[in-house]
Structure formats: C-alpha cells, structure tokens
Amino acid sequence: MRINVTSVFVDDQAKALEFYTDVLGFVTKTDLPAGEHRWLTVVSPDAPDGVELLLEPSDHPAVGPFREALRADGLPATSFAVDDAQAEYERLVAAGVEFTQPPMTMGPVTSAVFDDTCGNLIQIASMHVG
Amino acid sequence: MVAYSGRMDDAVFRAIADPTRRILIDELAARDDQSLFELCVRLMQGHGIAVSRQAVAKHLAVLEQAGLVQTRRIGRTRVHHLDLDPLRSAWQGWGRPLTESE
C-alpha cells in the first residue's frame, strides 16, 4: 500500500488549476471527466511520478462549514515542502499571492501560510540545519 | 466604577499569573494580529510547550476576558490583537507605592 493521491477542496476546478499551475508552478498530471466535474490532479515538476494533489470539488454540504472553521483559526488545509520558504514567500508575494502568515522560523523549520484563492490556507515549509 | 475597575484588575492579574499566557502576550507584542494556528506553532515549536489547541484557545479566552486581547477578523481569519491598556491601568492602580518608595 502506498499514498499516491492527496487532495484539497477547491471552489472552482478551472480557477484552481490556473492557480496551482500558473502561480504555484505545479503541472497537470491527470484531467479526466468525472460526472459533472473532473478528476483533476497536479504534481510537482520536480517529482512528476510523485504524490498527486487532487483538486477536489467542494460542493459537498459539509465542506463549507468545515473549511470556514479551519480558516477562522488560521489552520492550513495542507502543507507543501519548499527548499527555501523565505525565497518562495518573496516569489509568491511578487506574483500577487496573499499571505496570512509571513515566514516564521521556529527551530529547524521556516514556514509561511498563504490563501490559495480557492477557499484554502496552504502552508509552505522548509527545513534547514542549525 | 471603583468596584468595576477592581474586578478588571483582578482579571488582569489572574491572566498574567500563568506562564503560558505571559508567553502569548510576549508573542503578540512581537507580532500582533496572529491566528490561533500561528500562536500554537509559536508555543509548540518556538517554546517547546506541549499544549493542545483547545488549551491555547482557553488561555486566549482568559486574556480576552481581562481585556488584554481582542479578536477581530482579517478576511475570513480570526486574529488576536494585544491591548496592554488594562495592564497599564492595573499597574498604575497598584504599583504606585512601589515606584514612590524608590
């Protein structure tokens, strides 16, 4: 058994694909019709055969209250690894991304949290030595 | 008014009697308007305090009751704003004999 797909709920799949590819830099892995929606996944260009991120429609009635409660407390829906959180923060701010938490270094981890414009807060984190 | 202000002073001194709450005050003084998540990360990773999110929320509620913290929304996220006026007021009411004796 292995983990090959993880997901974030998105308000609008087309808009999400644009943000996750054009802005964040992921690439489309699978895009297949699935009922009224799409089975839509992206991967990191650094790991095209790695774990896929499913951009999952948020139309289930439980998703709205669940995500509102997470957002109210500033909790990210998921976390992505980056080489340098500070540099990534600067790149994304220049691209117009809004951060709810600027980079913060705590021990060996630097993390920051941004709004993915599709209903989620997303954390980026880098590990460093010393 | 005197009775009210006395009760507020009690709430302020109770609020700052706890070391975790004093750290929360320090962290909000360093960076205001933090979410519950960010404060939890700072407590757990920055200070090595093993504490649940619910416990941090309770500490923040005690600070809020004492008037030291106010919550407001930035977008859809609730953030915590530090207000040190109740602490100043409690100190002025109670700490003056100490300064005068110096």
Image (tube, coloured by chain):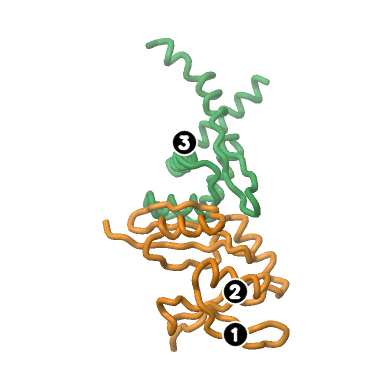
Task: Report the Cα–Cα distance between label 1 and label 2.
Answer: 10 Å
* Coordinates of residue B72 in the picture (x, y in percent): 64, 44
Labels 2 and 3 share a subunit: no
Residue at 73%, 72% in the rendered image: A61
Instruction: Give whichever of A10, B98 is nearer the camera.
Output: A10
User: Can residue B91 be seen?
Assistant: yes
Q: Amino acid at mark 3?
A: Ala
Q: Which residue is mark 2?
A: A17
The tag earlier along the polypeptide, 1 or 2, is: 2
Q: Which residue is mark 3?
A: B17
Give neighbour class at mark 3: few <14, some 14-19, many 20+ (Cα, 10 Å): few
User: From the viewer's perspective, is residue B4 above or below residue A7?
Assistant: above
Q: Which residue is mark 1?
A: A31
Q: Circles 1 and 2: CB distance less than 8 Å?
A: yes
Residue at 62%, 55% in the rendered image: A72
Labels 1 and 2 share a subunit: yes
